[in-house]
Amino acid sequence: MKNQEAKILIVDDEAIARYAMRKALESMGVEIREAPDGEVALKEIQIYQPDVVLCDINMPKLNGLELLKLLRTMELKRDIPPFIVVVTAYGSEKIAVEAMKAGAFDYLSKPYDIDELRLLVKKILDQIALKRENIALKNQVAQQKGGTIIGSSAAIQKVLRLIDKVAPTDVTVLITGESGTGKELVAHTIHQASHRADGPYVTMNCAAIPKDLVESELFGHEKGAFTGATDRRLGKFELAHNGTLFLDEIADMSLDTQAKILRVLEQKSFTRLGGKDMIRADVRLISATNKDLAKEIERGAFRQDLYYRLKVLELELPPLNKRREDIPLLAQHYLHLFAQRHQKSMHHISSRAMRLLANYHWPGNVRQLIHVIEQSIVLAEGEKLDLDDLPLDIQRTEPADVVETKEDYAFGEKSFTELKDQVVHDFEKKMIKKALLKSNGNVSQAARLLKMKRQFLQAKMKSLGIERMFFINFSNK
Ligand SMILES: Nc1ncnc2c1ncn2[C@@H]1O[C@H](COP(=O)(O)OP(=O)(O)OP(=O)(O)O)[C@@H](O)[C@H]1O
Ligand SMILES: [Mg+2]
């Protein structure tokens, strides 16, 4: 970790002791804050989020040991918790040991040697750097696992060819397509196939961030730039230096922000909010939207000049129902994935079920298909995913199959009683599903249709693994 990024908190009730320590550390270039007692320190640890806390033991209000013990019981929402070093009076080794037991990383006895202090801080910063690298590596591996583009359709094959061509360049790419068609997946794939793959991949969803925070998110801010800006913060452009910045849902950006982004793209530099320094960032920009930008331009909601800047290359992802031959491949791929994840031995999809999947219109595109497969797999049993296992709003598209008998009952290994139980089981499942389909997932209403007590129906649904959720027709709402 670079010293400039390190945040250090000095906790001591004596101002002169804090001053001395600050002087000793300042030359290292680290950022320093002070707290005069344990209570203030506790607040600072939560808000300022220091990497290292240098803490005196004897203090009014909350003393060092109490602070340590308190910290252990708290859940600090951080990947790497702060390293705490206690500073004890000469000859109080016993307390130092107690502090280490309570979670301190190390101790320093007064009077300490300045070089010894600096060395200790340096050692801690190196450890933090290593931990951060590990976490980043793990994230990278996790992301790489999730990211293969599946599909044999001409449309997807063309997308794959374009990715190959465009990835090694720094060309700005605009990805369009309905929700759930794979825009984010494509953006990430471009980054990974580019020479920036080792650099950061930073994403920003323009729709998810409150309007007046978008600029500070993008460009960062200096301490005091606005009320609430208690610290300097780096923006996404700066964080994406030497890497890729993925701007998602760009149609939701205000015209103001659009103008600023355009300027950054032209000048290749910007200033943090409330700052004067021009900052250069070498960033490859990929953007995405599920809206029709031409229409947005027409109604004055999107800048034409920015549009041309962003769409140097435009990749259009067609909706899933326009490339149906990809459905079996995707279904099979995600079946394996979820079977593994949920520890099921299910690895096949019956041809009837596959036919249904391939014919469904998939308004939510690939994302919806993935959810359907996962839902089905969680509830289904056996080795083959069949019609009955699919959510009913999918089954609804071919109502005939809902009443059709599942299989013919032939002589074989099963006894008469077993076969009869099977028939009853199938019959129960079918009737209950039919009733729920009719009632749109309303259990009381379904019970009335079946002339059955509601509690009894609920128990049956539970034992048969029938989920009410599947029968609610959300499109009516
Ligand atoms: N061709 C594909 N092969 C494999 N997985 C895919 C494919 N297309 C999409 N997916 C998966 O589908 C899910 C949805 O894709 P993604 O998040 O990229 O969609 P999106 O277009 O960004 O949607 P939105 O506009 O709603 O943000 C992801 O889990 C993604 O990995
Ligand atoms: Mg997306």
Image (cartoon, rainbow, N blue to C red):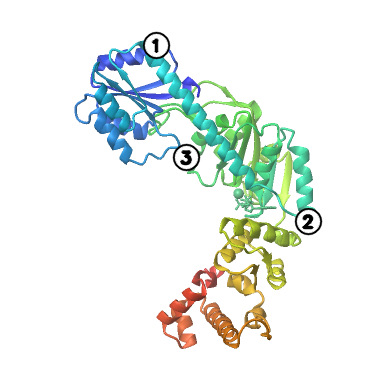
- Furthest-left residue in this view: 60
Q: Nearer the viewer, residue 468 or 136?
A: 136
Mark 1, ligand 2, within 8 Å: the answer is: no
Residue 257: quarter of image: top right
Q: Which residue is mark 1?
A: 115
**Residue at mark 1 to residue at mark 2: CA–CA distance:** 65 Å
Q: Which residue is mark 2?
A: 153
Q: Secondary structure at mark 1?
A: helix
Q: Is residue 15 left or right of residue 243?
A: left
Q: Amino acid at mark 3?
A: Asp
Give the percent coordinates (x, y) of residue 54: 33, 23
Q: Is residue 157 left or right of residue 245?
A: right
Q: How many callouts does the rendering have?
A: 3
Asked whether the residues under the numbered discs 2 and 3 touch, taking CB atoms below 8 Å apart as contact, a structural biologist would say: no
The answer to whether any part of residue 64 appears in the image is yes
Give the percent coordinates (x, y) of residue 142: 59, 43
Q: Which residue is mark 3?
A: 212
Residue 38: quarter of image: top left
- For the residues carrying marks 1 and 3, which lies nearer the camera in this image? 1
Residue 104: quarter of image: top left
Q: Nearer the viewer, residue 381 or 288?
A: 381
Q: Is residue 437 left or right of residue 111?
A: right
Q: Secondary structure at mark 2?
A: loop
Q: Earlier in the sequence, mark 1 or mark 3?
A: 1
Category of crowding for the residue at label 1, using alpha-carbon neighbours closer than 10 angstroms: few (below 14), some (14–19), many (at least 20): few
Q: Earlier in the sequence, mark 1 or mark 2?
A: 1
